[in-house]
Each structure stands twice: as C-alpha cells, then as structure tokens.
C-alpha cells in the first residue's frame, strides 16, 4: 500500500506527455519557472538526458532492487556496468565525462585519483596506461567510446568523493545555484548529489532536482522525498545524506 501511495504521489508531478527527459517529465510548481542554462552547456545537456519509463525501479549493478528505491522519482537511461564501481562520486564523474566526450572536448576530460595523480583521457586514448602514479605507453591510439568507458572504469577504481571534492570549485554565493552543481562531502564513506534542474519564483527562491548513485553501485536516480522531486536548501529532507543539501557542501566544475 505504501509503495502504491508513493507512486500516486509521484504521478502528480509527472507531465501527461511523452516522458523522456527532465524537461518533459517533471511539472513545475505554480509560481516557478525554469532557470536559464547555457546553450550547449553541461546544465542543458543534463536536462536533456533520456530517462527510463515511468515506474522503472532503481537497481544495483547485480540487478537487485536498490535500497534507495523508496526515493526514486526517475531513472537516468545510462549503463551502470556489472561491477561495484559506479557509486556516488563516480556517477557525477560519469555524467561530466559523457558530456565532454559527446562535445569531443577530449582535453577537458580529466579527473584526479585519491592519490593526487591526474588521470586524463588524452593520455589513455593515446595508448598510455596507469602504473604506480605514472603513465606507461602500452597500446595503440584509440578515441572510441569503448576506450572512453574503459578510461572511466579506471577513474572509478581510483577516484572518489575525497578527490572529487578537492577538484571542484566552492560556490561562494548559494543564490547562484545552477543545474550541474554538486552537493558533496568527501569521506569514507562520503556522498554527493548532482543538480539536474533548477526552478525559481519571483522572490528568487530556488528549488531543484537531484540525482545520485549509491553504494553498492546502482542506476543514477533522480530523487524525491515525500513524493516531491523538488528540493530546496531551506527545507529539511530525510533522504539518506539529506544533510548535504546545504550551502556548506555546494560546489561545481570549473
């Protein structure tokens, strides 16, 4: 019965049209409008990501129902692999990497390992392989998507919330919150959320959609709390790690 009521609540926020991405699926509350995003930018790309059909549950990399399923508002239609690799920070890096790869901005695809080693895609695509915080030439040049995904798996293995938190830029003014920003706290375990959309009313109060992966690795899910997918920094949320939804943890990519 509880699951049925949650589904009914979620449907109240869904537009009665073909639901294939953030823009088409989620209704905007009265009095709000979507914040603008840069054409071709990361935020615009996130809003256009395809979503799996309504009612699709969050599953782990093993195919089990994820323990975070209670908070599922939607599932991003993106692979998660068959290993316990694409967890919370990894999902954020996956989204950023996918965006840059689709833009063919290969030089910008770079993430630091927890050790501090800078792992960039250009080295990997040019045939270099990681060994003890050094690059060793071992393969032929290959910028294909399968090579990109092998690079991302390497990043997932050696990076995490601690390294990602250090890479990101702190947002000094939380009123500038935008799509693509990240709430993050590094640690073992740490956690992070990525902002998938932002809306604002005439009083400049902002609400936003959040997405995450979790432990063990699972589908990237857009979240909801009490059947409402729109979060705000001035309203407490009791989702797991909900205390991170605060200006104190707000960061973004350069």
Image (spheres, helix red, strand yellow):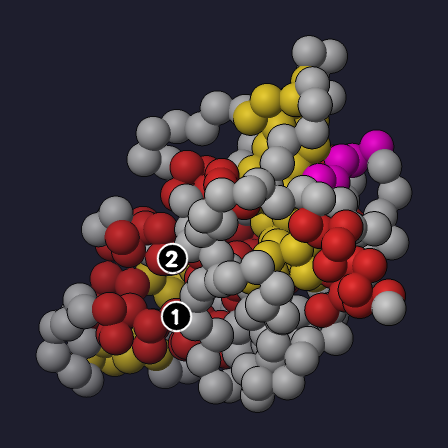
Q: Nearer the viewer, residue 244 or 71?
A: 71
Q: Which residues are magenta?
A: 229-234
Task: Give percent across and percent down for residue 238.
Answer: 87, 54
* Residue at the image position 82 percent from the left and 59 percent from the top: 5
Disc marking residue 152: 1
User: 31 above or below 8?
Assistant: above
Count every numbered label the image shows and give the total.
Answer: 2
Q: Quadrant of residue 68?
A: bottom right
Q: Nearer the viewer, residue 66 or 217?
A: 66
Mark 2 vs 1, N-terminal side: 2
Kindly tell me whether residue 96 is visible in this rendering: no
Task: Give percent across and percent down for residue 214.
Answer: 66, 69
Secondary element under disc 2, as helix, strand or loop, is helix
**Which SS does the magenta portion mostly show?**
loop
* Residue at the image position 59 percent from the left and 22 percent from the top: 33
Q: Is residue 92 magenta?
A: no
Q: Is residue 230 magenta?
A: yes
Secondary element under disc 1, as helix, strand or loop, is helix
Q: Nearer the viewer, residue 104 or 135?
A: 104
Disc marking residue 97: 2
Give the side of residue 106 with respect to residue 76, left or right.
left
Kindly tell me whether residue 246 is visible in this rendering: yes
The reply to whether callout 2 and callout 1 are in contact (CB within 8 Å) is yes
């Amino acid at each position: 019965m509880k699951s049925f009521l949650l589904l009914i609540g979620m449907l109240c926020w869904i537009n009665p049209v073909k639901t294939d991405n953030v823009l088409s699926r989620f209704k905007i509350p009265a009095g709000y409008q979507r914040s603008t995003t840069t054409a071709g930018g990361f935020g615009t790309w996130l809003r256009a990501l395809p979503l799996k059909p309504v009612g699709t549950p969050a599953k782990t990399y093993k195919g089990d129902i994820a323990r975070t399923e209670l908070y599922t508002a939607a599932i991003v239609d993106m692979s998660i692999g068959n290993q316990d690799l694409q967890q919370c920070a990894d999902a954020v890096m996956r989204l950023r990497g996918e965006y840059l790869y689709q833009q063919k901005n290969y030089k910008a695809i770079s993430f630091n390992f927890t050790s501090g080693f800078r792992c960039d895609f250009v080295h990997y695509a040019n045939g270099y392989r990681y060994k003890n915080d050094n690059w060793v030439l071992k393969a032929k040049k290959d910028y294909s998507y399968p090579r990109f995904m092998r690079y991302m798996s390497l990043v997932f293995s050696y990076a995490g919330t601690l390294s990602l938190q250090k890479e990101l830029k702190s947002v000094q003014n939380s009123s500038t919150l935008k799509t693509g920003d990240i709430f993050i706290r590094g640690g073992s375990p740490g956690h992070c959320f990525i902002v998938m959309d932002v809306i604002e009313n005439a009083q400049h109060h902002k609400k936003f959609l959040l997405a995450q992966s979790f432990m063990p690795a699972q589908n990237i899910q857009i979240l909801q709390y009490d059947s409402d997918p729109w979060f705000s920094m001035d309203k407490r949320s009791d989702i797991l790690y909900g205390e991170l939804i605060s200006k104190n943890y707000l960061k973004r990519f350069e």
